């Protein structure tokens, strides 16, 4: 009896630790998406498209970048999807909005 209980407990602990590690990974991915979005938005607001292009190359693997220009503001969304087997997919995103610097236009 004790052996079966121990086996089930170990299996449950492994499953819980896997889900916990995946959750921490998702939090790190969200932070990377927010950081990338902020960097891209800042470069576009400055009018530096070359630096913005380089920043787009540093987004998390498999992420998509969407840029919107509205009334003197630039908004950047970085979105990534991840799954853990049948758990997911989970969409993680980061958004940054910043005004254009004086003298710059969209």
Image (cartoon, helix red, strand yellow):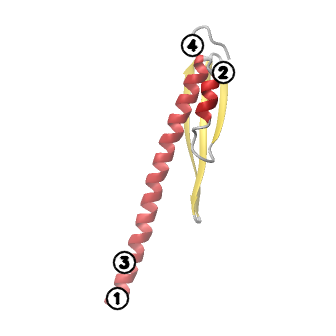
91 above or below 1? Answer: above
Pointer 2: what residue?
A: 70
N-terminal-most mark, 3 or 4: 3
Q: Nearer the N terminus, badge 3 or badge 2?
A: 3
Judging by the rendered image, the residue that carries numbered circle 3 is 9
In percent of width and height, residue 101 lies at 56, 13
**Residue that appears at 60% across and 50% down:** 81
Front of the two marks 3 and 4: 4
Q: What is the secondary structure assignment of the residue under circle 4?
A: loop
Quadrant the N terminus occupies = bottom left
Q: Tell me the quarter of the picture where residue 95 sits.
A: top right
Disc 1: which residue: 3
Q: Percent x, y for residue 30?
A: 50, 44
Residue picked out by circle 4: 101
Residue at horizontal 49 percent and vertical 51 percent from the top: 26
Measured Cα–Cα span from mark 3 to mark 2: 55 Å
């Amino acid at each position: 009896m004790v052996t079966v209980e121990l086996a089930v407990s170990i299996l449950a602990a492994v499953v819980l630790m896997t889900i916990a590690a995946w959750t921490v990974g998702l939090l790190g991915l969200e932070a990377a998406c927010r950081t990338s979005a902020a960097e891209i938005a800042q470069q576009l607001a400055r009018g530096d498209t070359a630096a913005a292009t380089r920043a787009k190359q540093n987004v998390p693997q498999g992420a998509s970048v969407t840029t919107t220009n509205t009334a003197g503001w630039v908004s950047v969304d970085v979105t990534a999807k991840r799954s853990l087997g049948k758990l997911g997919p989970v969409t993680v995103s980061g958004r940054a909005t910043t005004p254009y610097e004086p003298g710059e236009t969209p």
